């Protein structure tokens, strides 16, 4: 069975990648807050809900 070369080094690199990703995500959220944009949820930005109303059978 193969042995890992340096587990401590691999673990540290993995932790650094996670930290960098978390930092980038935080910065991206701050940028969205500063511009007043809502996160993209796939829904329209207007706050009015559209009621489809009765079906048009005509």
Image (tube, helix red, strand yellow):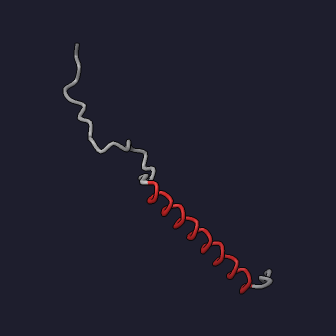
Tell me: residue 5, above or below residue 21: below
Q: Nearer the viewer, residue 2 or 15?
A: 15
Q: Is residue 8 left or right of residue 33?
A: right
Indicate the quadrant where residue 18 lies. Answer: bottom right
Q: Is residue 44 left or right of residue 55?
A: right
Residue 30 drawn at (x, y percent): 48, 63
Q: Quadrant of the C terminus?
A: top left
Indicate the quadrant where residue 15 lies. Answer: bottom right
How many marks do you count on the picture? Answer: 0
Residue 24 drawn at (x, y percent): 58, 66
Residue at 23% in and 19% down: 56
Q: Quadrant of the N terminus?
A: bottom right
Q: Is residue 4 left or right of residue 16?
A: right
Residue at 39% in and 44% down: 43
Q: Nearer the viewer, residue 41 or 14?
A: 41
Residue 34 drawn at (x, y percent): 46, 59
């Amino acid at each position: 069975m193969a042995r890992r070369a340096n587990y401590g080094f691999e673990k540290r690199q993995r932790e650094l990648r996670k930290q960098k990703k978390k930092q980038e995500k935080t910065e991206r959220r701050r940028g969205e807050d500063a511009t007043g944009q809502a996160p993209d949820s796939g829904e329209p930005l207007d706050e009015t809900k559209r009621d489809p109303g009765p079906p048009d059978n005509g």
